[in-house]
Image (cartoon, helix red, strand yellow):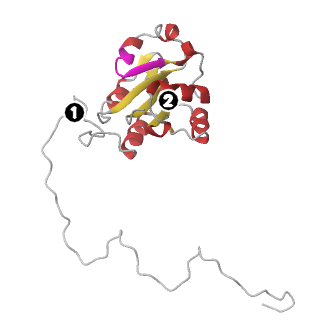
Amino acid sequence: MSNERILFFAAGLFLRKGAIDLEALHIISGISKGIGLWLVVNSPEEEFDLIPESKKLSGCFHRTVCLGGYGYVYGSLDAYSFLFREANVPKEQCLFLDTDLKRAIYAIDNQVHAAVIVNNRFLEQELLLRRLTDQSYVLHPKPASLEVHEPSPIVSPPKTHEPSPFVSPPKTHEPSPFVLRTYEPVNPKEPL
């Protein structure tokens, strides 16, 4: 078995209404070298090929697996086992990035590493938190149309002796309203 790490991406992360999500592809371009990138498609290859630009999308990954052609449904234990065998990597070296919460929970319940990705920001954060991106990867690259200006000088406010409204007031000895207090029972026959 190989020691390579594999990231399995659900095709839904990159296909939005039949079009390729270029921002998501840009995000995964920052993944460190030596990590295998596999695209997992639930349908058979014949159906996947009907999607415009499916070949272009497949070209961004080391391998595309159309599970429907093998008789597997993405999210089943059989499908995960099949993918581990195909990758020739222990399951501890694999991570499934999925758009479907139920599939991800099922995977985690069955000791398969998985994460739910609901948008590109989550994808970016997940890759950073797991240290899967190169150090040179920049989180939010500036758009090509953004003009760069010289930074403005830092201006300090004039020094005064008045307390700042952002400084906490001095502590008092009154008890916090969030502290549990105990009281003696009140005798209802006694006047207050």
Name, please, the residue furthest toward the right.
Answer: 189
Q: Count every numbered label the image shows and give the total.
A: 2
Q: Which residue is mark 2?
A: 84
Amino acid type, mark 2? Phe
Is-magenta flag for residue 190?
no
User: Is 188 placed left or right of 152 in the picture?
Assistant: right
| Residue located at (35% from left, 28% from top) | 23
| Residue located at (60% from left, 22% from top) | 73
Q: Position of residue 91 (x, y in %)?
A: 49, 36
Name, please, the residue furthest toward the bottom.
Answer: 190
| Residue located at (42% from left, 17% from top) | 19
Pick whichever, 135 or 70, lies toward us.
Answer: 70
Region of the chain picked out in magenta, as a range: 56-65
Distance in Å between CA atoms under marks 1 and 2: 44 Å
User: Is 64 placed left or right of 157 in the picture?
Assistant: right
- The relative height of residue 5 versus residue 14 in the rendered view (above or below) is below
Q: Position of residue 138 (x, y in %)?
A: 26, 40
- Give the position of the N terminus as an image quadrant: top left
- Give the position of the C terminus as an image quadrant: bottom right
SS at badge 1: loop
Q: Position of residue 17 (x, y in %)?
A: 48, 18
Amino acid type, mark 1? Leu
- The relative height of residue 72 versus residue 147 in the rendered view (above or below) is above
